[in-house]
Image: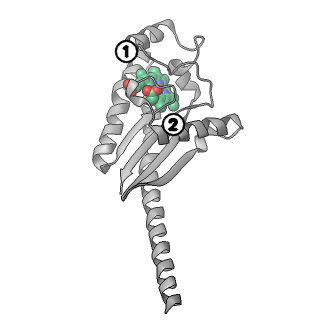
Amino acid sequence: MKKLFAATLAITAFGALADDAALIAETRKTALAIPPKLLQMVQEEIDKGSLHGAIAACSEKAPKMAAAASQTTGWAIRRVSLKNRNPEAAPDAWERAVLEDFDRRRAAGENAAMMEKAEIVSEGDKRTLRYMKALPTQALCLNCHGGPDKITPEVKARLTELYPADKAIDYREGQVRGALTVKRAL
Ligand code: HEC
């Protein structure tokens, strides 16, 4: 009898784990669809030769895209960075730890494009699914996130005007620029 009880418990726990894995897979799939759209949007503006348009795309369309995805899913989706440009893109404690881990792994030679993290965090009886996908700095990002040799004086002036407390410069290709982050209440 005792054995049967233990077996039932084990099956229940396994069922819960399988459910969690399915929730993580679903969240991941939705989140992973967003960065390529952001990249395409910036690339299109840059191809048009309009860095001004690209800045507008980043400052207006990118947050709108995250807000629309949040509305459709009911999850909180946004971008964060340890050196944020938008003052609202500062990470919380969980996100900060993950970003610091991404940076350590990158410094050890890992490819930032492959980095992600998923965890179900419990606080009392509240469970939250947390997911982050690293956004690597690519060559085109340096137009607005690179060093003084990459950012033109016009772009610099516009960025300073829009973001007086901008920290998101001096990146090099391959570094972790930030991450897409999802918070989903379960
Ligand atoms: C044309 C200029 C421009 C280019 C190119 C650009 N960004 Fe940005 N980026 C911005 C601006 C402006 C913001 C602030 C957006 C906001 O207000 O939310 C920003 C914000 C971000 C953020 C949110 C965190 C923060 O610092 O506020 C991330 C992450 C980010 N960019 C990553 C990238 C990546 C990765 C690329 C290359 C694929 C890239 N950006 C290319 C201008 C640019």
Circle 2 packing at 10 Å, graded few (<14), some (14-19), many (20+), is: some
- Asked if residue 112 is positioned above or below residue 6 in the image, the reply reads above
Judge left or right: residue 185 versus residue 39: left
Task: Tell me the residue at 65%/37% (across/down).
Answer: 104
**Place of residue 170 in the rendered image (x, y in percent of width and height, measured from the top left):** 58, 18
Residue that label 1 marks? 162
Residue 90 makes an appearance in the image: yes
The type of residue carrying mark 2 is: Arg
Name the secondary structure under disc 1: helix
Name the secondary structure under disc 2: helix
Task: Tell me the residue at 43%/47% (across/down).
Answer: 31
Observer-nearest of 19 and 66: 19
Judge left or right: residue 175 versus residue 145: right
**Place of residue 50 in the rendered image (x, y in percent of width and height, measured from the top left):** 42, 17
Residue 96 shows which numbered tag? Answer: 2
Spot the residue most to the bottom: 1
The type of residue carrying mark 1 is: Leu
Which is in the foreground here, disc 1 or disc 2? 2
Observer-nearest of 159 and 55: 159
Residue 29 makes an appearance in the image: no
Decide if ligand 1 comes within 8 Å of the CB at mark 1: yes
| Quarter-of-image position of residue 51 | top left
The quadrant in which the C terminus is found is: bottom left
Q: CA distance from mark 1 to mark 2?
A: 24 Å
